[in-house]
Amino acid sequence: MRAPIELGGQDMYNVWSYKKIVPNEKIEYIQNLSDEHGKIVDPIKLNMPADFPKDTETIVTFKNLGKYKTEITFREYADFGQMFEFAKIGLEQCLNKMAAIFIKS
């Protein structure tokens, strides 16, 4: 993820630890901030506010809508406090990158 230019434009990294995968139905994972090598880092060490969560539980569900269409729903279970809008921007960046991969396929 990349922070907005007005907030420094730094790159941020995260890792996902998968808890459950049900093909064509659901993916559950815990998301953590990390360094560029995938080592989990305390958000405070990355200059995040004290109320930024260390763990973000995420559940992604898939709903078949017919020929070549799937509805994807993301639910994040964490209190992002004052960083909510930036967490939303980060998730949107991830989704846009994922969509670009599927468009190339």
Image (tube, helix red, strand yellow):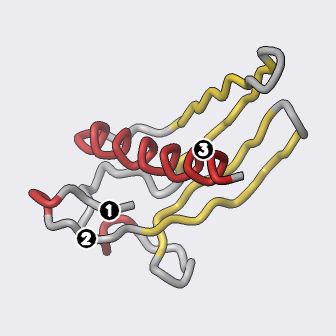
Which of the two residues, 48 or 24, is positioned nearer the viewer here?
A: 24
The residue wearing badge 3 is 57
Give the CA distance from mark 3 to mark 1. Answer: 21 Å
Placement of 9 over or under 23, stated as above or below: below
The residue wearing badge 2 is 10
Query: What is the secondary structure assignment of the residue under circle 1?
Result: loop
| Left/right of residue 29 with respect to residue 32 in the rendered view | right
Residue type at mark 2 is: Gln
- Of label 2 and label 1, which has the lower sequence position? 1
Q: Are marks 3 and 1 in contact (CB under 8 Å)?
A: no
Q: Residue at x 37, y 65 (%)?
A: 43
Give the CA distance from mark 2 to mark 3. Answer: 24 Å
Query: What is the secondary structure assignment of the residue under circle 3?
Result: strand
The residue wearing badge 1 is 2
Query: What is the secondary structure assignment of the residue under circle 2?
Result: loop
Q: Residue furthest left?
A: 6
Q: Nearer the viewer, mark 2 or mark 3?
A: 2
| Left/right of residue 13 with respect to residue 27 in the rendered view | left
Task: Indicate the position of residue 60 as horizontal and vertical percent values.
Answer: 68, 35
Q: Residue furthest top?
A: 65
